[in-house]
Image (cartoon, rainbow, N blue to C red):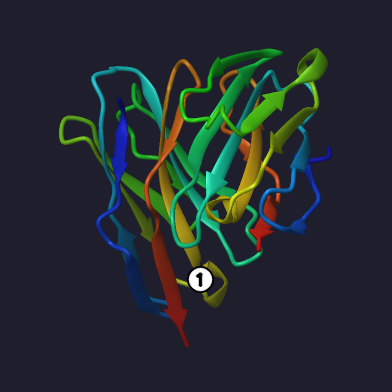
Amino acid sequence: EAGVVQSPRYKIIEKKQPVAFWCNPISGHNTLYWYRQNLGQGPELLIRYENEEAVDDSQLPKDRFSAERLKGVDSTLKIQPAELGDSAVYLCASKARNTEAFFGQGTRLTVV
Amino acid sequence: AQTVTQSQPEMSVQEAETVTLSCTYDTSENNYYLFWYKQPPSRQMILVIRQEAYKQQNATENRFSVNFQKAAKSFSLKISDSQLGDTAMYFCAFMEYGNKLVFGAGTILRVKS
């Protein structure tokens, strides 16, 4: 069974440019998470979906970040415009009912 | 809001020895899950072990075991017979039944030969 797939693995952009990350969760997993992880720190939740509904986006900086999960499957996280402080690893995870969360390999974003 | 605290930023252990990583959490919930995840330099977050709060028996997975103290809100991870491949960042995580998953700051574990 394929795991959580994220792309790209790495992205370098100039500040003020837009960037998008894509996540394909494990088939059948209704819950999808986006986390941001700064170097040497724990993941911090940006947004959580239950199917196509965003149920927890209180930590998402809505002035520049947006996310969508079309048809309750794939998800895209966008930043526009990017700032230097957005440099981090962006992790996607998914889970089914009564299971743990499974993580993708993450996207390392560098804003220069 | 639930919080997870890992008070040990870094730990070292000799190969084949035993090490214990600490974790405490704060919640008003009675039913929840606790996890330990491992994150090697490759960044892939991998589940090590899980514990359901309603189970009194401590979870065990091969060389990994936990000491779950519900009243004290403590959830430590013991790694026996440490191996070089155990070198990684370890995260303690809490999940309420509503699927909100919160992580601690992590503990870097270095296994020395």
Q: Image height check: is A69 above or below B36?
A: above
Front residue of B47/A68: it is A68
Instruction: Where is residue A14? Give x, y as percent.
Output: 72, 58
- In the shown orientation, is residue B10 left or right of residue A92? left
- In the shown orientation, is residue B6 left or right of residue A17? left
Give, as a three-letter code, the residue at label 1: Thr
Q: Local crowd at mark 1 within 10 Å, few (<14), some, or many (≥20)?
A: many
The residue identified by callout 1 is B87
- In the shown orientation, is residue B48 left or right of residue B92? right
In the structure shown, which secondary structural element does the residue marked by tag 1 occupy? loop
Q: Work out which residue is located at the far front of the displayed protein and give it.
A: A16
| Numbered circles on residues, count | 1
Question: Can you tell which quarter of the image residue A70 is in?
Answer: top right
Question: Can you tell which quarter of the image residue B21 is in?
Answer: bottom left
Quadrant of the frame with the N terminus of chain B: top left
Residue drawn at the location 71% of the way across and 13% of the way down:
A52
Instruction: Where is residue B53? Give x, y as percent.
Output: 34, 26
Residue B80: in sight, yes or no? no
